[in-house]
Amino acid sequence: MIRDQCVSAVGARWLRILAILAVATIALGLRLRAVDLLPVDYDEDDYLRAGQQYADAIRAGDWAALTELNYREEHPPLAKLAYGLALLALPPVDEIPDRPTTAGPAGSLPEPHLLVARLIAAVAGTLEVLALGLVSPLAGLLLGIHTFTIKYTSQVMLEALPALTSTVAVLAYARSKRRWNGWLILSAAALGLTAASKYLYGIAGVAILVHWLWETLPEQRRPTALARWLAPVLLWGLLALAVFAIANPFLWPAPIERLRASILFHGEYTQSETVQQANLPLWQPLVWLFQSVPWHPGVFVVALDALIALLAVLGLKPLWQRDRLYVLWLAVGLGFLFLWPTKWPQYILVLTVPLALAAATGLQARIWDPFCRWFGHIRAHRLRRPELRDLLRPATRGAILRVVPWLLPGAVVLTLITFYPLIYQGGMALTDFNAVSIKDGVNGGIWREVREGLSGQTEPVEIDIFSFGRSSAKEVRYAGFGPLLQFFTGVGAGLLVFEILWTVLSVGLQTALGVGVAWLLHQRGVRFRGWWRTIYILPWAIPEFVGALVWMQIFDPRYGWFFLGTSFPDTPGYPLAQQLSSWQQDPTAGLIVLLMAGTWLGFPLIMLAASAGLKMIPHDVYDAAAIDGAGGWQQFRAITWPLLLPLLAPALIIRGIFAFNQFYLFYVLNPPWPLITLASLSFYVFGETGKYAVSAVINLFTVVLLVLFLLWFNRLSRAGEGVTYA
């Protein structure tokens, strides 16, 4: 038996090694493909030029030049120096011209210099995947196929090297168990190299610092205990700082001045015209995470970034329970990207390693393990043949036949009014049905094209669902699943992120205000309780369109009540009014205005449900909790909210559906892009462009998301179990 166990352990180890090698091979192959197919992108000319300068200086034996060379001084030189070392073996060519940072991609770059520099980045990107694969082969695979990671580690960018070294820094720290050994020294050295390549990736060091201090916080706060607590952390940080200084020769002549100028540049850049014109919203990093690279069709073999992000959401809780370090890494990085005004897509590479780990954990803990348990349960409790015969005995068949005539009319009506419209819209979504071909479509053209397309009798036509032009074809044509894929991989990802963000924030604020008002009115001694409830119900009684018009009058930038007197700096609320005055152009300010209006319109329903629930909670449980020493917040968290949630659940579901399908508020206020719900987008597409098929795609997308939301929320809140304490 012992021999069998040893053989099994050896086999599992070799299987793991083969899996890691396979993951690294896949990652390298995908990156080599990207190296060959990707066009020249922004900044590649800058960093290749920097590499040329380093290569020329080293060839000439002018090592002192390393302390003066650093083209694009806003970034540290280590990654650019790595490109220079790679170019040493190539014959020198004319130096790439100096172009402004606002210039577009270069038309062409010298070969094979571009190829060699890209290969260096691809190798570093593959090593990053390999390092993660040593911890989790599945996470390494997900990182290896992530399209944004492939793109920015296959071009002459600064991302590949710091992405690798930051990953090594975190993984080595995790392996060290916060004990001084070779792993902890490697972690500090890798962090120093990270900062010497690109400052942004130092976020990994912040995550390590937060985790280290959190996990080792002493119970006693005496000075000696605090000194012992901070000493190893400071030593680790000083070692990282020393490596950063050694690997950054450009700082040696004037470290303070040059470091200050390099760091301050980024703050000034956030206010530059380039960033302002992009006008990307606060939540743009989530948009990048929930979509694959949309710019280079045919380059990436698979585009599963959205699936990876969804799996990561599922895996956050089990990963937190298993190892908080990686969740903190993800949270710190995401928080910084939310706050930092510059929202370029390559910045999300500071998150993709913990994202892949969370996705792998979600796939295993939320999908694979439950499936294995379910399959094992089915195998253990599968029905035997005699039991199957009992189910189909004559008496049972007779009962079924007697029931069917009573159920059949309702089933037919339900199918006609519910399922047939969905099926018809599904058929529309597979075609290019529009205002010009409406006659052919309603006369059977939709079903004809779907039947012939699915049976292979006709080839799908290529259409651009995002163009505003109208089709001239008078007959419906089969488009296949192309429009669906375009929507999911293109603008649909950004809309999905905003829909979820809007629904969560809107319903969350409505719940907080509604429960808060209900709680205040539930307290003893409140006078005119019924009158106050009547006042608070009024926003719900007003039609949404009318309420939206009221809010438009309040926040109209020219004549709105909120902005009256904002020309006087001494006016109370002047800073907030100034910040919100551009809400029709600024997506973040626009979201704040929408949330104010949405909260006002929706909180009365939550207040009524909470008021009814509070009356049904027995006072005895509060008295018992008070005797045990529970304070007000502890009573709310442990008693009020758990007992209130089953009664609130139906109201939350209703408000969630209304928020997800919010139309009039967005139609009247007309906030800037991308502040738009799927319902509003479907209306605009249907009315403005006449692309009924695209509108059907959006509607199907909305239905699927709402069904998933209802299933998830019902399971989370256990609304189906009802109230057991009344």
Image (spheres, grey):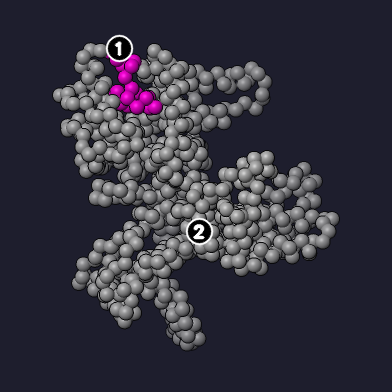
What residue sits 54% from the left and 59% below the top?
A: 669
Task: Determine whether 721 is above or below 298 in the image.
Answer: below
Q: Is residue 305 left or right of residue 331?
A: left
Can residue 391 be seen?
no
| Amino acid type, mark 2 | Asn
Kindly indicate the quadrant of the structure image that contains residue 353. Answer: top left
What residue sits 37% from the left and 66% below the top?
A: 689
Q: Position of residue 270 (x, y in %)?
A: 45, 36
| Amino acid type, mark 1 | Ala
What residue sits 37% from the left and 30% below the top?
A: 162
Q: Position of residue 601 (x, y in %)?
A: 62, 61
> Which element carries disc 1, helix, strand or loop?
helix
In the image, 568 versus 312, the foreground residue is: 568
**Quarter of the image with the N terminus in it:** top left
Q: Is residue 439 left or right of residue 217?
A: left
Alpha carbon separation for disc pair 2 and 1: 59 Å
Q: Which residue is mark 1?
A: 64
What residue sits 38% from the left and 71% below the top?
A: 425
In the image, 401 versus 129, the foreground residue is: 129
Can residue 159 be seen?
yes
Which range is magenta?
Answer: 63-83
Q: Position of residue 688 (x, y in %)?
A: 40, 66
Q: Which residue is mark 2?
A: 670
Mark 2 and mark 1 lie on one chain; the one further toward the N terminus is 1
